[in-house]
Structures are given as structure tokens and as C-alpha cells.
Image (spheres, rainbow, N blue to C red):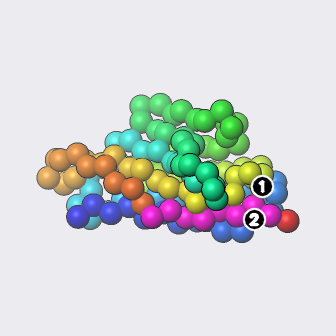
Amino acid sequence: QVQVVESGGGLVQPGGSLRLSCVAFGGVYTIYAAAWYRQAPGKQREFVAQICDNTVYAAAVKGRFTISKENAKNTVYLQIDKLQPEDTAVYYCNAFVTTTEFKDRMEWGQGTQVNVSS
């Protein structure tokens, strides 16, 4: 069964950096596309970035966030620089995978908490 797990969140001061990881496992052949979303307290989940043949970013994070993919590890990363308090949220990974049985699956992770505070 395909599972997706995020990690790398934590408490960081404004201006700091974090690298979030999203690993897919359980019969995964490859991640062919993925996206990061975030949900701040009291707000709806919002799109942050996606990667497929190219990368796309939300306007609020462009220039500070970088999404990348390491195929050999079935892992997607989100490098977050120049963190701001408004980046505080739970960050979720949405992975589109091809399984070892060559079936396509889409799975969400449980999220990783990012807190930006001095």
C-alpha cells in the first residue's frame, strides 16, 4: 500500500530556513509528480508548489521556496528560505506515483508542522 510521509518541520526564527522532505513508499516505482500545500490555523489549505515536467509556485512563496525531486529515493523536497511568520502552517505533500505494478496512485501525507517565531 502506497504511503507518503513528510518530515523536516520545526520551530525556526524569522529569516531562517528549513528543508521539508516527502517520501513515498510501499510498492512505489517512481513519483512522477508532486505538490506541497499548507494550512494555517483557521484557514483553508492552500497550494504552495508543484513539480512535474516543470515547477510552479504560488505567488506568495515564489523566490523563497524551491521544490525538487530525487527519483532514486522517491523523495520530494521543499526548501524554504527567508521564513516569515505567515509561513507558519502544517505543510502537506500530495504525491502522484506509479507503483511497481505500473498503476497510478495519488496519496496525501499527514503533514509536518512549521512554526516561524522569534
Q: Residue at x 72, y 68 (%)?
A: 11
The residue segment tinted magenta is 110-117
Question: Is there any visible trace of residue 18 in the rendered image?
Answer: no
Where is mark 2, residue-wise? 12
Query: How far across and how far down the image is residue 102, in percent?
Result: 16, 47
Q: Look at 56% across and 49% down and name the residue there.
A: 44
Q: Find residue 104 and name its label.
A: none
Mark nearer the N terminus (1 vs 2): 2
On the rendered structure, is 19 left or right of 95? Answer: right
Q: Residues within 10 Å of mark 1 (few under 14, many from 20)?
A: some
State yes or no: residue 16 in magenta. no
CA gap, disc 1 and disc 2? 9 Å
In this view, the residue farthest toward the right is 118
Observer-nearest residue: 94 or 51?
94
Q: Amino acid at mark 1?
A: Pro
Residue 94 in sight from this viewpoint: yes
**Which amino acid type is shown beneath numbered disc 2?**
Val
In the displayed structure, would residue 85 be above or below residue 62?
below
- Residue farthest along the front direction in this orientation: 42
Question: Residue at the spot x=22%, y=52% of the render?
Answer: 99
Inspect the magenta stretch and tell me whether residue 113 lies in it: yes
22 relative to 64, above or below = below
Name the side, left or right, on which 27 lies relative to 38.
Answer: left
